[in-house]
Image (cartoon, rainbow, N blue to C red):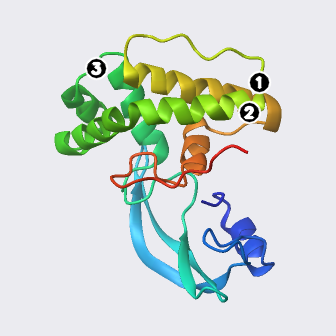
């Protein structure tokens, strides 16, 4: 996961400051991925993500901006809005209408989040503990999904206080390497 400023990403990549997730060696530029549409709250944007290569292990990597999730057409903010609305009691059909998305798309997001909710809560609670070891974990709400959203929200607030402003869903995407709603075993950034 990289930031959203393409100039900064390119400068950082060319300087060799991005590291290979497999062997920790410097990544180098390696062309661009296919152009894809990323849908935001209002409108969509055609993007071509930067590719990189790790010369020692010969692996290539697509540098995915933190405002997106891997293999999702919609931005992290749009998906986060849907998850929040669902926790507030909105049905997937109502959320789909509000966001102008297909019912099946919203249903998929909500199902993936429900399946991952306990793991998401535990992951973001661990990160919050690293940032503020004295802070107690959020009290259970009785819903795994609400607990997971609370954990993301608590960590987002703590991160803003410590590191400055950053949209909460960008932070969630970055920490999960864009795999917040993955359908495989995720390789998230673990706290040290």
Looking at the image, can residue 156 be seen? no
Count neighbours of disc 1 (C-alpha within 10 A) and say few if under 14, some if 14 to 19, many if 20 or more. Answer: few
Query: Is residue 18 found left or right of 186 in the rendered image?
Result: right
Residue at image mark 2: 130
Is 16 rendered above or below residue 70?
Answer: below
Q: Residue at x 42, y 26 (%)?
A: 84
For numbered disc 1, what is the local secondary structure?
loop
Q: Gap in Å between the C-alphas at discs 2 and 3?
A: 33 Å
Cβ–Cβ under 8 Å for marks 2 and 1: yes
Q: Residue at x 55, y 55 (%)?
A: 177
Q: Quadrant of residue 97?
A: top left
For numbered disc 2, what is the local secondary structure?
helix
Residue at image mark 1: 133
Looking at the image, can residue 140 be seen? yes
Residue at image mark 3: 90
**Mark in front: 3 vs 1:** 1
N-terminal-most mark, 2 or 3? 3
Q: Gap in Å between the C-alphas at discs 3 and 1?
A: 34 Å
């Amino acid at each position: 996961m990289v930031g959203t400023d393409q100039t900064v990403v390119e400068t950082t990549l060319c300087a060799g400051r991005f590291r290979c997730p497999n062997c920790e060696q410097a990544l180098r530029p390696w062309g661009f991925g296919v152009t894809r549409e990323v849908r935001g709250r209002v409108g969509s944007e055609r993007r071509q993500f930067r590719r990189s290569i790790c010369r020692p292990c010969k692996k290539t990597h697509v540098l995915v901006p933190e405002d997106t999730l891997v293999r999702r057409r919609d931005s992290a903010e749009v998906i986060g809005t849907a998850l929040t609305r669902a926790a507030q009691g909105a049905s997937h059909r109502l959320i789909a209408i509000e966001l102008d998305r297909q019912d099946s798309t919203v249903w998929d997001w909500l199902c993936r989040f429900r399946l991952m909710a306990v793991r998401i809560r535990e992951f973001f609670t661990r990160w919050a503990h690293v940032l503020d070891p004295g802070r107690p974990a959020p009290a259970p709400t009785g819903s795994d999904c609400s607990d997971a959203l609370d954990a993301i929200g608590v960590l987002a607030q703590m991160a803003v206080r410590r590191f400055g402003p950053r949209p909460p869903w960008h932070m969630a995407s970055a920490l999960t390497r864009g795999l917040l709603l993955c359908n495989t075993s995720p390789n998230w950034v673990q706290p040290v």
